[in-house]
Every structure is written in C-alpha cells, then in structure tokens.
Amino acid sequence: MSETRAVTFPDLSAFKRAGRKIVVLTCYDALFARLLDDAVDVLLVGDSVHQVLGGHETTLGATLDQMIYHGAAVRRGSHHALVVVDMPFLTYQVSIPEAIRNAGRILQETGAHGVKVEGGRHLVPTVSALVQAGIPVMGHLGLTPQSVNALGGYKVQGREEGVAKALIEDARALESAGASALVLELVPRALAARVSAAIQIPTIGIGAGPECDGQVLVLHDMLGLNEGFTPRFLKHYAGLAATVREAAERYAAEVRGGAFPGPEQSFE
Ligand code: KIV
C-alpha cells in the first residue's frame, strides 16, 4: 500500500479503531529504508541490529551511539513511515533523568519519531516522564530480549495463567502511563488476543499470532538472508541468501577468469 502522508503516532490508534492492521519491519540503514518506506507504516530501528548486522549473540551490547547512527540513517531514507528507535540496555533503566536525556538524544540526533523500551509495570514512572517530555513511547512485553539472561533463553512467555494475567496488567499499566503502542513478542496467540482486547493502544506482534493489531518481523530474517534462523513464527518472503551467494560466486568466477571487467566496464 502506498500512502504519501507521513504516518503519526495518533494514526496507529486510529488504525486499530478502524480495524486496519499495522505493518512494521525492522530497518537499520537508509538504503533499505528507501525500499521499505511506502510499503510499511512503521520502521523499527531495533537493537536486534547488534545481532543481525553485528553478529552478536544478544542485544545487550548495543549502545546509544550505535542506535543513533542507525536511526539517523533510517530517517534519511524515509519520508512516509513512522520511525521508532530502540533504547538499548541500560539507557533507560538507571534513572528517569538519564532515560529522558538518552531518549531526547535519539529524537534530536536522528529525527526519529519515538522510542521503544522493554518492560512492564516497573517502567510506568519512566514511560510517564518520557511522554510528559513529549517523547512518544512504544512498549515491549512478552519475550523481552534485553532480559534474555533472566528469562533463561528466547522462549514463549505467558503460558501459565498467572504470568498471562501479569502481562495483561503490564499492558494496561503501560497504556495508562501514556505508551502509544505495544510490541508483544513470543506469547501464545490467545494471550495476545486478550491483551489486544484489553487496551485501546495497538499491539504489534512478533510470534504472537494474528489477533494482534499489527505485525513486525526482522527484515533480514523475512528476506531469507539469515539462513540458519528458522523459528516457527518466521515466514520467508524472499530467499536472498542464495541470490547473494550466487552473485558473489559468479563475480568471483568472472574476476578469476578475466571476464570482468570487460570492455563495457573499462575506460579508454
Ligand atoms: O530489536 C528488535 O528488532 C525488536 C523487534 C524484534 C520487535 O525489538
């Protein structure tokens, strides 16, 4: 779908009220931002960049400067999509003034429209303070990757009723604190449906089933560039790893065989 008017945070809730699904992809650079901008509603500059592009095991080592670099690149490549940048681990947990300063840097230095933070009720004062400072906030519940060590791995959250009820309360608390939307990662479909019905702000699911108000996937995963990563929730919309490998092999063969560069690529 191609739209010319830039998407805003209030639009996301309006989309939910209208029953229009919200389309989100992660994006880390200007080149892909230009390619994705018209197709999606939100470009999420996820701290997954630290894993996907950086080759790290977890997101924990991502830094504020790194997120600002990628956020600014995505903003340079986009005009239509709402751009949300992940606040990395330890940039919003230490104190509220630090969280405001760091989120403010993200907005000032990247031109992004809002930030995403991971966590539930304990973040209510922080989310309220950010929102009061004019910084839109997207929450993130369920499997929160910055807590992977505490959670014991990347596994589905909220299968037990007690945990499910706590997650619904967390969602309500974040909504009351002023969050504009909520990512739900790796939760059972029925729980995501309960959360989505319990709050007015939209839920954006990843591994959370079709009842969410929108969906997000990691771009490089859905393009089939991350070959070894095949979790149940992922669908490949392209198989680019094979395309890239084949192009590199043809290039190598032509360079080694003397076919590249040919006369067309050479200057007299
Ligand atoms: O960092 C990220 O890419 C994310 C999405 C998986 C939601 O948080």
Image (spheres, rainbow, N blue to C red):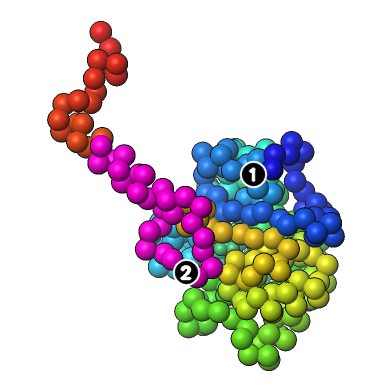
Residue depicted at 56% across the width and 59% down the height: 217
Residue 39 badge: 1
Give the structural element (helix, strand or loop) at label 1.
Answer: loop
Tell me if residue 31 comes above or below residue 260 in the rendering.
below
- Residue 126 picture location, percent across and down: 72, 69
Q: Decide: few, some or many residues near mark 1? Use Cα within 10 Å; few <14, some 14-19, many ≥20.
A: some
Residue 119 badge: none
Tell me if residue 173 comes above or below residue 73 in the rendering.
below
Amino acid type at circle 1 is: Ala
Which quarter of the rendered image does ligand 1 occupy? bottom right
Instruction: Let me know if residue 9 is in the magenta part.
Output: no
Kindly indicate the quadrant of the structure image that contains residue 24: bottom right
Is 147 left or right of 265, judged from the image as shown? right
Q: Decide: few, some or many residues near mark 2? Use Cα within 10 Å; few <14, some 14-19, many ≥20.
A: few
Q: Is residue 53 in view?
A: no
Instruction: Let me know if residue 227 is in the magenta part.
Output: yes
Give the structural element (helix, strand or loop) at label 2.
Answer: loop
Which residue is denoted by mark 2 in the rendering? 231
Farthest left residue in view: 257
- Residue 201 picture location, percent across and down: 79, 65
Q: Are marks 1 and 2 in contact (CB under 8 Å)?
A: no
Residue depicted at 54% across the width and 76% down the height: 147
Near-viewer residue (59 or 80): 80
Amino acid type at circle 2 is: Pro
Kindly indicate the quadrant of the structure image that contains residue 216: bottom right
- Residue 153 picture location, percent across and down: 47, 79
Near-viewer residue (72 or 187): 187
- Residue 245 picture location, percent across and down: 31, 46
Q: Which span of residues is magenta-colored?
A: 224-250
Q: CA distance from mark 1 to mark 2?
A: 24 Å
